[in-house]
Image (cartoon, rainbow, N blue to C red):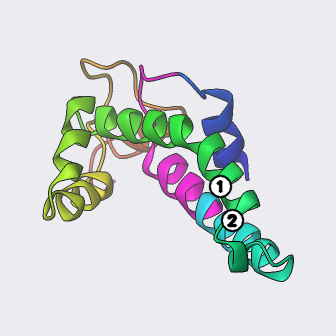
């Protein structure tokens, strides 16, 4: 829930970086909320009229944060947010999923410092091996 709230706090923030956890947990919560709202719409009979009211509201309120967290996730892999445009092609969706799954660049990159929590992992692994 923290990752979802963090992404929502950065509603219009297309700068900086988002960790894999922030991106995937936000995505998971949006999918789960979508299932819940679709179920409510169906139970209330909105699906029969072709207007999924609650699902539509969820979609409208989450378009910008979804784009923002996607751009920040691409930044974490040192890719420009313009890579989102590849998703407009058929195979592009698969390419984006692969990019979202990539490990982050270590330390700061051209889009800013590593998201909080990632720097400690690098520091822990930077010592002598086998000691």
Q: Name the residue carrying label 1.
A: 56
> Residue visible at 26% across and 37% down?
105
* x then y, percent, for residue 118: 45, 39
Q: Badge 2: few (under 14), some or many (20 or more) residues near its Cα, within 10 Å?
A: many
- Residue at the location (23% across, 52% down)? 99
Query: x and y percent of residue 58 in the render?
Result: 68, 52
Residue appearing at x 58%, y 52% in the figure: 26
Q: Are marks 1 and 2 in contact (CB under 8 Å)?
A: yes
Q: Residue 7: x percent and y percent?
A: 60, 38
The percent position of residue 36, horizontal first and vertical second, equals: 75, 72
- Secondary structure under tag 1 reads helix
Q: CA distance from mark 1 to mark 2?
A: 6 Å
Residue at (16, 57) in percent of width and height: 92
Locate residue 123 relative to residue 108 in the image: left or right. Answer: right
Which label belongs to residue 64?
A: none
42 part of magenta stretch: no
From which residue to which does the magenta span run? 13-29
Which residue is the site of mark 2? Answer: 52
Q: Quadrant of residue 54?
A: bottom right
Q: Secondary structure at mark 2?
A: loop
Whether residue 79 appears in this view of the structure is no
Label 1 Cα crowd, 10 Å radius (few <14 / some 14-19 / many 20+): some
């Amino acid at each position: 829930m923290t990752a979802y709230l963090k992404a929502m706090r950065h509603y219009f923030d297309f700068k900086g970086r988002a960790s894999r956890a922030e991106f995937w947990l936000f995505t998971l919560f949006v999918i789960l909320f979508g299932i819940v709202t679709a179920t409510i719409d169906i139970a209330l009979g909105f699906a029969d009229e072709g207007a999924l009211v609650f699902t539509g509201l969820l979609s409208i309120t989450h378009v910008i944060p979804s784009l923002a967290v996607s751009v920040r996730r691409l930044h974490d892999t040192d890719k420009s947010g313009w890579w989102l445009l590849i998703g407009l092609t058929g195979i592009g969706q698969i390419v984006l999923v692969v990019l979202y799954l990539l490990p982050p660049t270590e330390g700061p990159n051209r889009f800013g410092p590593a998201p909080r929590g990632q720097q400690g992992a690098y520091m822990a692994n930077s010592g002598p091996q086998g000691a």
